[in-house]
Amino acid sequence: MARLCDKYIEIAKARDPHEAEFLQTVEEVLTSLEPVLQEHPEYIESGLIERLIEPERGISFRVTWVDDAGKVQVNRGYRYQFSSVLGPYKGGLRFAPNVYPGIIKFLGFEQIFKNSLTGLPIGGGKGGSDFDPNGKSDAEVMRFCQAFMTELYRHIGPNTDVPAGDLGVGAREIGYLFGQYKRLTGLYNGTLTGKGIPYGGLLGRSEATGFGIVWYAEEMLKANGEEIKDKVFAISGFGNVSWGTAWQLQRLGAKCVTISGPDGYIYDPDGIGTDEKIAYLLELRGSGKNVCAPYAEKFPNAQFFAGKKPWGVAQDTGCKIDMFIPCAMQNDVHMEHAQQIVEGGCKFYCEGANMPTTNDALQYLMENMIAVGPAKAANAGGVACSCIEMGQNAGHTVFQHEDVYEQLHQIMKNIYANCANAGEKYYGNKNALVQGANIAGFERVAEAMMAQGLV
Ligand code: GLU
């Protein structure tokens, strides 16, 4: 029988044939929605899917700034406001040289479902620039951020669109962006999240993504009769998502034995998430240097595998891994890596970064493992805490660390339960979390779209 979703995948391909990453996520999401589309002819009649795959608004702008040598530089800035059906557009800004509409749209589309899964009142959006903050001075980053915000400010606001960080946009960039927003508008409000603690930021926001991933992973294990304590994890990346994940694994009595960077990966049999090691990682990150080689020098029990990724760590070291969590960036795990992971005897896989797995590798992992957790569910803790930060700012108050952790933990448990229930209902399998997350995220969005009419 012909699938209903194919028509929409073809529409997206015909419209934007060169946006490979966007088409990848559209195909992945719409394929899992097939049983829901079969059940709801009214979605087809109201053009719901055509509307969902087209951003409500896409803004592209020039960013002109002057570097330290006095040379004029021109970058491209973007904000794709994908869906406001559940609340103000919400999603990060990514600054990286490979940013183009296909990347921002993939992230924005994923963000709709991720934000829906949190159960909180936030729509989906994403933005960024092809600006590369690596190797730039603080003054250059500040001038770039000020120029970027000088255009963006007219399109955002606490009840319209609330950007935050993503790759290349951390506390420093958010600080400069917020300063310029305030200068231009005269408003002190929650238009940006991920702010510093002294000026409206939320305690716990910086580690929220990693903590949430680990709580989601814990639910995956529990549902299959396993506990997280004493389990061995291998993760990739060394950024915000990775250090939060490694730290929380340690806090819950598990062990994270790998991290990776552009120079290779580290295997540390003693575990990477101790307070001392996390502090050292944060210090290295702040210096803008590579992380892995210096880490191995400082902690001599650790081994450095230059130029390699951690997916073959079981084969490289003989260490049995209970769960892999890719935390670096999109399309980090290809088919050959998925095969390495499975051949190493691992049974659980949970995505930390956004879309870190190619579609064929994801399919292979789902067929060969007990459970695979999808990014849009597992890493939703970051944006969930951003929404809590919006609430804190709107209420002119300050929330306590422990309260934030408690709320976040409950949100992650709910997300897991919703994914597992939808997997069970539509695929007869509580471990069909990839499909379950797409469906559970979509159901809320679809209901709201039907209620709000043809807009
Ligand atoms: N960039 C993060 C994400 O992918 C956080 C977005 C936010 O806090 O708005 O979800």
Image: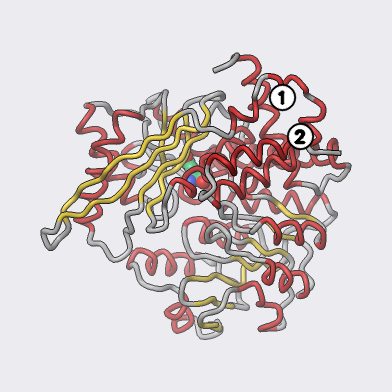
x and y percentages locating residue 30 in the rendered image: 69, 40
x and y percentages locating residue 109 in the rendered image: 56, 39
Identify the residue under disc 2.
4
User: Which numbered dot is residue 312?
Assistant: none
Tell whether circle 2 marks a residue whose Cβ is less than 8 angstroms from ligand 1: no
Identify the residue under disc 1.
44
Q: Is residue 303 above or below residue 437?
A: below
Q: Is residue 31 visible?
A: yes
Which residue is at a point 70% across and 52% down the rendered structure image?
373
* Kind of residue indicated by mark 2: Leu
Foreground residue among 214 and 112: 112
Q: Is residue 34 left or right of residue 166?
A: right
x and y percentages locating residue 265 in the rendered image: 54, 76
* Kind of residue indicated by mark 1: Ile
Label 2 packing within 10 angstroms: few (<14), some (14-19), many (20+) = some
Nearer the N terminus, badge 2 or badge 1?
2
Foreground residue among 226 and 303: 303
Q: State the separation of the CA atoms marked 2 and 1.
A: 9 Å
Which residue is at a point 55% across and 26% down the rendered structure image?
121
